[in-house]
Image (cartoon, coloured by chain):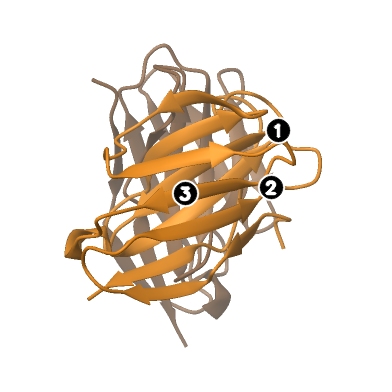
Chain colours: A brown, B orange
Amino acid sequence: KNQVEQSPQSLIILEGKNCTLQCNYTVSPFSNLRWYKQDTGRGPVSLTIMTFSENTKSNGRYTATLDADTKQSSLHITASQLSDSASYICVVSGGSYIPTFGRGTSLIVHP
Amino acid sequence: DSGVTQTPKHLITATGQRVTLRCSPRSGDLSVYWYQQSLDQGLQFLIHYYNGEERAKGNILERFSAQQFPDLHSELNLSSLELGDSALYFCASSVLGTMNTGELFFGEGSRLTVL
């Protein structure tokens, strides 16, 4: 069964600190992995899309890594800002017609 | 702004009623996807339309139906509403006919509250 597990479920950090969110998946075969940011009550917005051959991809202060061998991805946020408070969703495609969504990690950044 | 427009933004109705949610995709996008997000739940795929034709169904209840019109806008119809149908309903669009490649652009959602 295709599954995407994200950890931690929630995370609280202080402004300016770094943090790393994890995504483990069992989707096979693998096509791509996407990270989305979803502000409370808003629609998800794409941060990165990574294919099998990509190990690292950055988008400003967001850096995603992918280890296709261990089926793990991480999203690292550098120098967090209050606006980073959101849910971060990992989505993996390839195992079926419908991508598999993780339940998200809720990040709260405190001043 | 993703370019995907959803209306209404908020909707409050009673059990047993029927509502219609509307989605206009980004200009040029042929695919429209509908998702449901209940409180503290992940996004659940409901249905996918490509250029007017149904492409895939997810965990969509029989009380729910959708269609995509010739101008590519889509409507999600929810009938015989139950308390558990209260959720955020998102529409997304993409150029391609599959969710597995390229980028999905999400609307801001329609928040449905069933009392």
x, y (%) of residue B20?
46, 58
Q: Residue B30 bears which disc, if any?
A: 1
Circle 2 sits on which residue?
B25
Is there a contact, CB below 8 Å, between mark 1 and mark 2? yes
Q: Secondary structure at mark 1?
A: loop
Residue B89, quarter of the rendered image: bottom left
Residue at 27% in and 38% down = B62
Circle 3 sits on which residue?
B76
Residue type (three-letter) at the residue carrying disc 1? Leu
x, y (%) of residue A21?
40, 51
- Mark 3 vs mark 1: same chain? yes
Considering every residue shown, the one lying at the far bottom of the view is A111
Number of residues whose C-alpha sits closer than 10 Å to that of mark 1, classed few (under 14), some (14–19) or many (20 or more):
many
Cα–Cα span, label 3 and label 1: 16 Å
Residue type (three-letter) at the residue carrying disc 2? Pro
Cα–Cα span, label 1 and label 2: 8 Å
Cα–Cα span, label 3 and label 2: 13 Å
Q: Chain of mark 2?
A: B
Is B90 in front, or is A56? Answer: B90
